[in-house]
């Protein structure tokens, strides 16, 4: 039953300001940006009409002295450098995002880059002629191009974006994605899981209901999500996947097969590998429509090698990879407590699902032909654009709600290197769990907590997210201290941890900075550097940010007061809040950053109990069957 | 506010899963952080707290085992005890089940046997839930507690059987 929103006669919500918002699909192979224009969600092309921006970044020597955005080449133009200058041309950077050097080496990938271990932190850096680049920076360079494209098309500055991530991304990979957005100067409204985004694009389009399986095989990641669609609510029941499996791997097995056939040594040069991967990709595409694909390669020794890849050979090579996607499908069904027979629809997402063999195998498993009617390359960006439009407040009456889950269990290390699970996978977010710990030795004053993510029982087999220490525990007899540790996962799927020692109240708050991520200070520095290079005034920017925040507070409060201020506030409270609101309106026009900040904080302080009352009233109304929601939501 | 009150439901082991799911969705439509993306920080935090509570309440009540344990906690009964004085008949039965699972693994065509095994466990779980429903209705918390422990055993066994199924499936590449 949808909630109706009815405004008071004659007081209809102020003519709605349209906030420019976009959805971004930051893909392994290609990236896209989409937005809603005149009620229609569409992806935006570049000047040449290409909607897909190849996720390839080329750094040139020009970029050493002055790192300006226009000296970093992204997309199709960068693609041409891939073979001639592979070390400075970064492709498929998404596979490196939020990962450590060790992870990258075990990806089974022979990457044609030179990695440098970053001192002090585990994050690997890529050596380019323009200096060391982290995967976060490379991703930010792709995002900047999409931002520019969207702002040019929409004719204004974006207020916020929704960026999609593979559902199976762990905390470190999500945090790295968000960091890249911050570096690209984007306001992230939400990180959205790719299959959920696809379900939104697909479900809203068809007004679908029932249980959907979204099979998303992209360039470098695989996700399967099982969702229940019910009157605009998209409830993720389970998700599973492999964040290092995709079309790239198919290209790689073909390239390896060619190497065997053509007797190319395993230590071939970077550019030769790059070229082989291109040949492999072309062969893969050819085999979608043809029975054989011709192979033609110029070897380093000058000899021209010719060969052929047949359908049956091709299937023999790729079937094991496709099969690797089936066991996550089984696991997701099992976690959702469903069987294949319960699935109403199967939707295909991601460029790699264009391959007829993938469709065939997936159809066999789910015992029904999968849907392929929305362009599998664009569907994720379109879903993200729809959610961005709603989150930006452009559709206050919209009833859509996405209930997503945490893809991998969160746990902590206990004695003997074992993992104690705190939050099991497929728990709906936001979620918080509190666990109590105690000291092991007499007089112990500190405790190390190691947070891991994964399904295995041994710490070494899971992903290390963060280590932190709780200090200042008063010396006590072993096992008498009571330390409560709370793990909170927010709606973006990001973790924060706080700990309190109960008997003394020692409290520590930790934002989990993943072992392979950037520190906040790094991001600030990089942001400052990049701003200085484009010669924007940092002070002007800070003022502008405070004014935007002030506007947000003012608009939200005005809407609230109009809706229920007279019901929920006593006369003197109403007057006090109005006075503080007037004060904020006054200082906002000036250029005193601190004054604006203080006025916002003051207003925030005195409206605390009002906000609580409004929330409680809204909950009460939702529960007592009031279908008319006179408490307009903030936008 | 206890978890039943969150959904305006009477405190009982028997709940209507459709009703609770619908009320859960209605509540999330009001408190979910997505509805507060542009609200001031404090309201955003408040929304996250509320949405977290609603999720926690729903998770707990949705599943019969956690619902049963929660009902005991509401009665002030300690449920984290390690006291496992289970009746020996039940324990014997559990050992037999486990042996059976090991035997199934060694069969050359294990899937039919495994499926039958899973069906049997699921039937037992269903019976146990019916018993629990009666015991909670009669406020017989002691017996309910014993049966909830049995429930935990069965759930673990069921999970092991499913893992075996996954293992066998994956071995069949």
Image (cartoon, coloured by chain):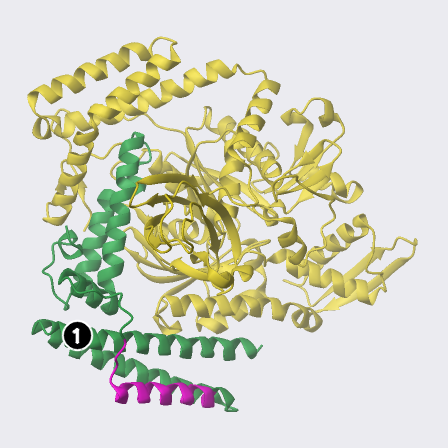
Chain colours: A yellow, B green
Q: Is residue B96 magenta?
A: yes
B3 displayed left or right of A146? left
Count of numbered labels shown in the rendering: 1
Determine the main secondary structure of the stretch shown in magenta: helix
Please give the name of the residue rendered at 13% of the width and 26% of the height, measured from the top-left corner.
A565
To which quarter of the image does residue A367 belong?
Answer: bottom left
Q: Is residue B116 magenta?
A: no
Q: Which residue is under mark 1?
A: B144
To which quarter of the image does residue A225 belong?
Answer: bottom left
The chain letter under disc 1 is B
Please give the name of the residue rendered at 21% of the width and 77% of the height, measured from the top-left corner.
B147
Q: Is residue A601 above or below residue A269?
A: above
Q: Residues within 10 Å of mark 1 (few under 14, many from 20)?
A: many
Q: Is residue B77 above or below residue A112?
A: below
Query: Where is residue A494 shown, x and y percent of the image?
Result: 42, 45
- Provide the residue span drawn in magenta: B84-104
Query: Where is residue A291 shown, x and y percent of the image?
Result: 69, 68
Residue A13 is at least partly visible in this image = no
The image quadrant where one finds the C terminus of chain A is top left
Please give the name of the residue rendered at 37% of the width and 18% of the height, measured from the top-left corner.
A547
B44 displayed left or right of A45? left
Q: Secondary structure at mark 1?
A: helix
Query: Where is residue A226 shown, x and y percent of the image?
Result: 39, 61
- Give whichever of A228, A379 is nearer the camera: A228
To which quarter of the image does residue B149 belong?
Answer: bottom left
Query: Where is residue A593 shown, x and y percent of the image?
Result: 39, 14
Q: Is residue A77 above or below residue B10?
A: above
Residue A145 is at least partly visible in this image = yes
- Give whichever of A348, A114 is nearer the camera: A114
């Amino acid at each position: 039953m949808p909630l109706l929103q009815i405004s008071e006669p004659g007081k209809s919500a102020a003519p709605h300001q349209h906030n420019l918002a976009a959805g971004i699909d930051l893909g392994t192979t290609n990236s896209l940006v989409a937005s809603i224009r005149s009620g229609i969600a569409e992806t935006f092309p570049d000047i040449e009409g290409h909607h897909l921006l190849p996720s390839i970044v080329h750094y040139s020597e020009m970029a050493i002295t002055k790192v300006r955005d226009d000296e970093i080449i992204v997309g199709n133009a960068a693609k041409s450098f891939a073979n001639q200058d592979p070390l400075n041309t970064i492709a498929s950077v998404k596979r490196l995002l939020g990962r450590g050097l060790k992870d990258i080496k075990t990806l089974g990938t022979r990457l044609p880059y030179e990695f440098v271990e970053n001192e002090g932190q585990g994050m690997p850096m890529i050596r380019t002629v323009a200096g060391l680049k982290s995967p976060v920076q490379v991703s930010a360079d792709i995002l900047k191009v999409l931002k520019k494209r969207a702002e040019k098309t929409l004719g204004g500055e974006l207020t916020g974006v929704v960026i999609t991530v593979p559902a199976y991304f762990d905390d470190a990979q999500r945090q790295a994605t968000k960091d890249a957005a911050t570096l690209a100067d984007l306001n992230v409204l939400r990180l959205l899981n790719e299959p959920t985004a696809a379900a939104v694009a697909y479900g809203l389009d068809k007004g679908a209901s029932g249980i959907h399986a979204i099979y998303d095989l992209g360039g470098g990641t695989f996700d399967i999500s099982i969702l229940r669609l019910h009157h605009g609510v998209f409830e993720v029941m389970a998700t599973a996947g492999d964040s290092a499996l995709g079309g790239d791997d198919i290209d790689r097995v073909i390239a390896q097969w060619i190497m065997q056939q053509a007797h190319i040594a395993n230590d071939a040069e970077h550019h030769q590998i790059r070229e082989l991967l291109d040949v492999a990709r072309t062969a893969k595409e050819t085999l979608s429509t043809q029975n054989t694909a011709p192979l033609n390669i110029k070897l380093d020794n000058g000899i021209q090698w010719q060969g052929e890849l047949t359908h049956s050979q091709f299937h023999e090579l790729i079937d094991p990879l496709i099969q690797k996607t089936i066991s996550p499908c089984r696991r997701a069904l099992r976690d959702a407590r469903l069987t294949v027979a319960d699935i109403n629809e199967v939707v295909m997402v991601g460029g790699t699902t264009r391959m007829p063999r993938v469709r065939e195998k997936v159809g066999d498993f789910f015992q029904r032909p999968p849907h392929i009617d929305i362009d599998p390359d664009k569907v994720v960006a379109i879903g993200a654009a729809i959610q961005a439009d709603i989150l930006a407040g452009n559709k206050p009456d919209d009833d859509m709600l996405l209930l997503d889950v945490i893809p991998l269990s969160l746990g902590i290390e206990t004695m003997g290197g074992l993992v104690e699970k705190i939050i099991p996978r497929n728990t709906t977010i936001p979620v918080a769990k509190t666990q109590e710990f105690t000291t092991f030795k007499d007089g112990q004053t500190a405790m190390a907590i190691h947070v891991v993510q994964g399904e295995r029982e041994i710490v070494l087999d899971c992903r290390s997210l963060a280590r932190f220490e709780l200090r200042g525990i008063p010396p006590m007899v072993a096992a008498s201290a009571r330390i409560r540790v709370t793990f909170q996962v927010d709606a973006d799927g990001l973790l924060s941890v706080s700990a309190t020692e109960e008997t003394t109240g020692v409290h520590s708050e930790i934002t989990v900075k993943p072992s392979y991520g950037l520190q906040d200070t790094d991001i600030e520095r990089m942001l400052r550097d990049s701003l200085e290079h484009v010669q924007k005034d940092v002070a002007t920017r800070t003022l502008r940010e405070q004014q935007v925040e002030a506007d947000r507070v003012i608009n939200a409060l005005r809407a609230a007061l109009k809706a229920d201020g007279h019901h929920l506030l006593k006369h003197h409270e109403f007057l006090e809040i109005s006075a503080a609101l007037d004060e904020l309106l006054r200082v906002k026009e000036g250029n005193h950053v601190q004054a604006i900040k203080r006025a916002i904080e003051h207003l925030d302080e005195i409206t605390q109990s009002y906000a609580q009352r409004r929330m409680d009233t809204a909950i009460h109304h939702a529960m007592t069957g009031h279908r008319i929601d006179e408490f307009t939501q903030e936008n | 506010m206890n978890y039943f009150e969150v959904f305006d439901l009477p405190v009982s082991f028997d709940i209507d899963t459709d009703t609770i799911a619908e009320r859960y969705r209605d509540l999330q439509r009001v408190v979910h952080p997505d509805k507060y993306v542009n609200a001031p920080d404090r309201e955003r935090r408040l929304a996250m707290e509320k949405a977290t509570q609603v999720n926690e309440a729903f998770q707990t009540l949705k599943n019969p085992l956690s619902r049963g344990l929660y009902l005991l906690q509401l009665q002030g009964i300690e449920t984290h005890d390690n006291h496992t004085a289970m009746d020996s008949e039940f324990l014997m039965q559990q050992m037999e089940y486990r042996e059976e699972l090991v035997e199934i693994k060694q069969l050359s065509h294990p899937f039919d046997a495994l499926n039958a095994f899973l069906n049997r466990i699921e039937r037992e779980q269903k019976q146990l839930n019916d018993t629990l429903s009666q015991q909670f209705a009669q406020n017989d918390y002691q017996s309910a507690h014993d049966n909830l422990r049995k429930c935990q055993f069965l759930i673990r066994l069921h999970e092991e059987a499913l893992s075996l199924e996954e293992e066998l499936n994956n071995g069949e590449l």
